[in-house]
Image (cartoon, coloured by chain):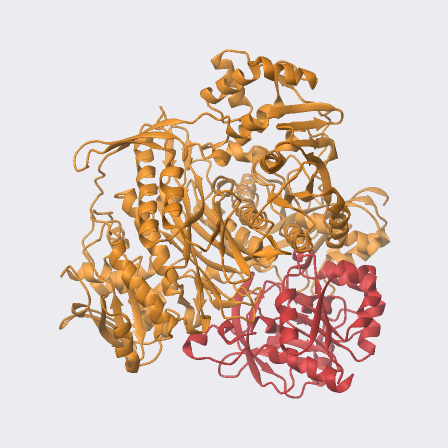
Chain colours: A red, B orange
Amino acid sequence: MVKAKAIVLDGYGINCPHETAYAVRTAGGEADIRHVSEVAETPALLREYNLLVLPGGFSFGDDLGSARVLANRLRHRAGEEISEFVKGGKLVLGICNGFQALVKMGLLPVPDFTQRVTLTYNASGKFEDRWVRLAMNQKSPCVFTKGMEYIDLPVRHGEGRFIPSGKEVLEEMLGKNMIACQYISPDGKVNEYPYNPNGSVGGVAGVCDASGRIFGLMPHPEAYNHFTNHPAWTRGANRAGEGLKVFRNAVEHIGANL
Amino acid sequence: MGEGAHRIEVRPKGDLRDPNAASLARQILELAGVKPSDVAIVRAYNLYGELSDAEMDKLGKELFADAVSEEFSYKEPFYPDYWRIEVGFLPGMTDNEGNTAVQGVKDVLGKDVEAYTSRVYAVKAEFDDDSVLAEIAKKLLANEVIQAWRVYEPEGGAFEPYIPRVELDHAPVAEEIDLQVTDEELMRISRERTLALSLEEMREIKAHFARAAVRKEREKMGLGKGATDVELEALAQSWSEHCKHKIFNAKIDYSEEGEGVEGREESIDSIFKTYIRAATDEVRKPYVVSVFKDNGGIIRFDHENDIAVKVETHNAPSALDPYGGALTGILGVNRDVLGTGLGAKPIANVNMLCFGYLDAKDVPKGCLHPRRIAKGVIRGIEHGGNMVGIPTVNGSVVFEQCYTARPLVYAGTVGLMPHEIGGRETARKEIRPGYLAVMVGGRIGKDGIHGATFSSQQLTAGIAGSVVQIGDPITEKKVIDMVLEARDLGLFEAITDDGAGGLSSSIGELAQFSGGCEVHLEKCPLKYPGLDPWEILLSESQERMTLAVPPEKMPGIEKLAKKHDVEATAVGTFTDSGKFHILFGKSTVAYVDMHFLHEGVPQMRLKAVWKERMPMPPSRPLMQHGDALRALLASPNIASKEWVIRQYDHEVQGGSVLKPLMEGNAPSDGGVIRPVLGKNDGLVVAHGLCPRYMEDAYHMAMNAVDEGVRNAIACGAKFGYLACLDNFCWPDPIKGPKNPDGDFKLAQLVRAARGMHDAAVGYGIPIISGKDSMKNDYYAGDSKHSINPTLLVTVVGRVEDVAKIASSDFKDVGDAIYVLGTTRHEMGGSEYFKLHGGEGSGMPKVRVKENSELYAALSKAIEKGVVRSVHDMSDGGLAVAFAECAMGGKVGAEIDLSLMGRETDEDAALLFSESAGRFVVSVREKDAFKFEKMMFGTKAKKVGRVRGDKRVVLMNGNNALVNEDVFDLREAWAGGLKW
């Protein structure tokens, strides 16, 4: 079994690396927190890892659009190494600001450094913190959501509204089951605000590439690492830190396939 | 195109609209009475540098516009046929997005440019004349304190880059000021330089500089007989009310006059020593690590970790620029905690905000409307907390008329630090002569000069300018990341933040550890050239920390600075010369005795006179109880604050346990987080704030402490392991021609401090830190607007096992409901009386002994996991607390008030009295006996149960006082505030 070894990016306003690294470790992997400047300077250090995690936060203050500057920096300085990383069958996970970065540097939904979809300003016009329910696409190749049906997770963003650049892109994503998870209401349907917290087209919350090894989502699985994270835990919603499952899936996939 | 100014505009594509455009259209209709047929918002980036068309196009595609959702133009404006109002920053204001654009351009083109952002608000409407546009610009879009605006007529076609570069055509110089002048001249100097020094203080400085020994020493340094502006400014900031708390340390003659008072007379030598520090000394808790000597207080949290806590106010700046004021407030208090001991990692933010009413019709001249203040402040706090990655775990929003001209913005931070690093106690700072003074973080500009002295004065219509500034959350985050890594590597031996007073204050204070310093101002990195030496020293440019670094560790600091993309510059050396020695190039510009700088300020002598207040009784007929309950739930102070709360991140760092709103939007009494993931130890943060209890400041303070404590207990905090912080915000308590009742306000302050002391000692809670803000008055012409005396008590505590605590919402049908504590006829200052147009007398009194027993028992019962729901009673009394429990659980419930502990029979008092020390608790019916046994000897009375239907019923014996549908109540509560 290959041990999962994650590089969790930090710096410039990324602000969830610690709980994200904690989630990887709790799931059985190793995790190093490395500064974006280190990767920009020495992209080859990615070779030491088999899981690249871009955590949530406000890289560069969301100035010029969320994750835009981070995406450019990674693409310009470390694009080739990231490309190699992906081709080597390794895993990439982007959460919130990390998802925005993956989309804007063109790693999702197709890893060819061309932006096809975006995550833009919430329809509500404001940042919101609320727990949402996600339904996982059972047909999706996504390795991170395997074996999961639905999950409650917090969203905490001002720019999470998923928009594809055109019909063809959406159709390709639907055809290849790249839409890995959607916001739903308690009755299981894709619904309006606040169940769909940002006005995403089709309630899209998370997207993977055709291989299922690159995955990005707006909600924060690392923030559901203990049953007391859930807002209804005092009412008996006792599902021990279900967000960790996303990380366990990654660790298991790496163990079995790399 | 070549070298020069360029501009690129960006807008959403196709049907997409900036979500804020629709609300702007509404506001324009309200303000101008004209309904725009379209409103759009355009982002503009104004660049200065050598850029070709091809490069502009590349920047548009790769950097400024989103390829999917946005389009750009760099040749002509968008919406040329609309009215366009452009808003940009004034020269020298922090432009965070512009600074990011500089880095972004470098990434894409490898080129250095200047970048300035602006927004264009394009409005399609028929306006009678362009004065309407000016109104829209001023009232809705631009804050002229920090921004400039211009209007373009339709079809004007203008596409001019906006380049607000700072160009100071000025050769820096230190000026010498003759102090051997008349009293009038001294006061003129103090006034004209905004020194905020009194005549007595100016005379003290005059005398000091006249001393032969002082003259001789200074002569050796090449200085003249007068003081330099650098010296005078450094003294003024060091001696400011903001830094020295002169009122809290004054000698006060306190007396009581008139009817209904005891006639007490006493002399108090420092409120701080007599009441605040004394309380902490008296309670002697072993978990206290460091109090009153550092930027924040420190207590033990668990075997490995300490927590550092600080709560600050940022009132004056928030009145002028609500966004920037609140943002710098929260970022400033984060840095306070980062600068406590060797640095604590910020893990929780709190904020308590006091505003005028959102629907205020008129505001005093020169003031922003409360709605605009509230929205700006909330956005500032959102950015300050969210972007830095600190969860906002607790807070409140209070509305009273008195905060219209002078809003209060309390911002607090809790930090976590290892108790020891490499065997060295993290709480301790140590500086030896020869250590370098290293400035880390942002650069210095003219921003924020005179913050310390400015906040020590009243606001006047017209004063503003450079005292207002905008924080930079991302630079702060980078500084935090770097400092914490350097701390863990042992690269520095002391740290403090550059807050009020800038380097003068930070280095000046650290220099006390070694006994002196030598600072070279020419080494300080500047935003732009042309600053005078005193400006460099005093500037409050944000996001800076000062470290004391042993010279051999400097390469390590430089390496980390590079990694984190932060500037770190050695600007001086700590010495043991006994002198605050400042140089600019080769010349000495300040040479002040350290002792005089820090201890020279003369003690103030003030008079306080207490008189009985006669509060106005309610003026309107009392409502039916059910109607009163619904009206209270919809009233500003009680109505749901969800709109605000959800804009703050409460989850980041992953340890959220008790959020501000739980499932069903059940409001929590405080916040609980797990600071150490993987462990069940909880940190509680709660607070008490009750400015409505005006009748007697002594009891007001007792109530604030009690409210803070009972909130903490409700959250599961261990009674016996609590600590608190005081933040006094007062109207000017110094009597003068413009302030005839200053002596009464000072008496209120004395009484509040005494109440704080008595409650803290009574409950055995150390006061570990505090702050005061003493001039919360606003003068508009002849009218004066002052706040009510307002005391915030923040309480922190520990939860042994977070899995055992309870939220406020009722859980299951059949659960037994208890009322804890005794209800008395204490309606003075209540929300109920306010609802009926008065204040009323007979305010709640705190019975510390009675409450202590109850709190200890309840705390244990929660620890044992017996309690299913618990909620404290405060604003609106029992009826409101009970309704909140039912609304949170979306269930009906019924209680009989004749069964509870009570010393009144009046129905309205049973429902709405705000007696302290009370809770609503529910337990499983099967645990009722167990719970009663645990609560034995206290007033814990079983009064009812959670019902199967949706009715909220309050009985008094056989008489139904209230019988309402839980969803009707919820609707009233949820829709009470119109933002």
Q: What is the quadrant of the N terminus of chain B in the image?
A: top right
Residue at the spot 27% in from the left edge and 70% down from the top edge = B935
x then y, percent, for residue A127? 56, 61
Is A163 placed above or below B387 here? below
Q: Out of B969 and B668, give the one closest to the viewer.
A: B668
Q: Using the rendered view, name the quadrant where residue B6 is placed.
A: top right
x then y, percent, for residue B804? 42, 73
Is B93 placed above or below B836 here? above
x then y, percent, for residue B874? 31, 58
Q: Out of B555 and A218, give the one closest to the viewer.
A: B555
Q: Out of A153 and B871, give the one closest to the viewer.
A: B871
Is B14 placed above or below B598 here? below
Q: Out of B883 and B790, give the one closest to the viewer.
A: B790
x then y, percent, for residue B80? 68, 50
Residue B39 visible, this angle: yes
Left or right: B494 as drawn, with respect to B452:
right
Residue at the spot 67% in from the left edge and 17% down from the top edge = B223
